[in-house]
Amino acid sequence: MNIDRAAGRRLALWLLAGIFASASAYAQEAGPEVVHLWPDGHWPQATQGPERVGADGSARGAVSNVSDARMEIYRPEHPNGSAVVIFGGGGYFRIQIGGAARPAAQWLQSLGVTAAVVYYRLPADGWSAVSPFQDGQRAMRLMRSKAAELSLDPERIGVIGFSAGANVAGVVGTRFDAAFYPAVDAADQLSARPDFLGMIYPVVSLQAPLDQTRSRRELATQPDAVAAYSVEAHVRKDMPPVFLAQAVDDPIVDIGHSVAMYQAAHAAGVPVEMHLFEKGGHSWGLGKPGTLVAQWPRLFANWARSHQFLGAPPAGLVPLAGASNATAAPRQAAPAVDDEDDSGD
């Protein structure tokens, strides 16, 4: 009888293990959770037709004609309490989801970090210039409102932005208490301030001489856009710590953008770290393995952990050669996407 009971317990445990494994596999196949930023009909529609996803050249994996502003949330199997909201670049006329934002989210997910990719509304599609910044603030507040549901520490929710997406992230990080939109619900009573700010090949300034970007042109529909959305002009002591990474040979966004942000943050007493790589161009996402710019994810993870934001990495990750076990590289980086067409940033 005792043998039968032990065998029964083993069978029950085996069945439970199978159920949990199936549930985990189903969750992975189901993909990210979609969270809509606004109630239906909240904004008058500015776009017509379905979203477009680029298939060729610099547009590959890029999304445009966004009418439904939303987040895709990538939940790790074992969340460590940290979260990152991600804004892809694209000069405010598209969003580089496939080549930058989604691979970054999947990498962070592998570290135990909950990641959210934001599909923000684009001025090039007819939305007002303030729309991306409304969506950015709202995304931050909604992530905080879901802290308990997502097993997050509400004081360890940061942002990463690429190129024009770094402009969105930077404005959210410096003007977090600006009233970009009237409150919609209880989530809007929460802070929109990110706890840390990553700016990768960033568009920082709309001011001369750094005003030669597609972002500057697309935001020009707002008369005071230069003053409103030049991030370095709004740097303040109570903003989050800043991480900057850019290639010196970037043909789209002058490294003066990163330098201007570094100087402004340093002058204000804001913790800031900057990495300028000799080569790499623009729009490299996680970076092609073996390139100089592919170092940035490890450097960012080290920096964020030094501020107690990312938490310890899960066991079993393979570190970069010469790196400590506290830093793991992306297992497979997406190929770099050259975003030079149409001066996209």
Image: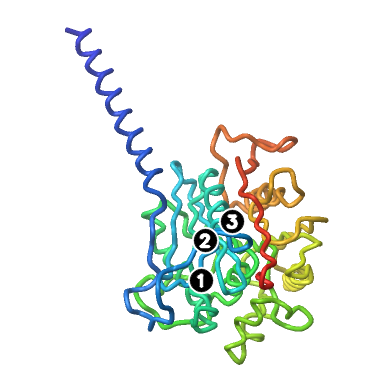
Q: Amino acid at mark 3?
A: Gly
In which quarter of the view is residue 259 placed?
A: bottom right
Kindly identify the residue that appears in the image at 81 percent across and 62 percent down: 249
Q: Left or right: 132 with respect to 167?
A: left
**Quadrant the N terminus occupies:** top left
CA gap between label 3 and label 2 equals 16 Å
Which is more toward the observer, 1 or 206? Answer: 206
In screen coordinates, is 263 left or right of 120? right
Q: Secondary structure at mark 3?
A: helix
In the rendered view of the protein, which quadrant contains the C terminus? bottom right
Foreground pick, 80 / 36: 36
| Residue 118: mark in rendering | none
Badge 1 amino acid: Gly
3D distance between C-alphas at marks 3 and 1: 20 Å
Q: Residue at x 43, y 70 (%)?
A: 69
Identity of the residue drawn at 65% across and 67% down? 163
Tell me: residue 18, above or below residue 218: above
- Can residue 131 be seen from the camera position used here? yes
Q: Would you say the residues marked 2 and 1 are in contact, meaning their CB atoms lie under 8 Å apart? A: yes
* Residue 95 point in image, percent of width and height: 55, 66
Let me know if residue 170 appears in the view.
no
Q: Which mark is residue 136?
A: 1
Q: Nearer the viewer, mark 3 or mark 1?
A: 3
Are there few (<14), some (14-19), or many (20+) residues within 10 Å of tag 3?
many
Q: Which mark is residue 85?
A: 2
Residue at 40% across / 49% down in the picture? 31
The numbered dot on residue 99 is 3
152 above or below 189?
above
Front-most of 23 and 82? 23
Say which amino acid is labelled 2. Answer: Val
Label 1 crowd bin: few (<14), some (14–19), many (20+), radius 10 Å: many
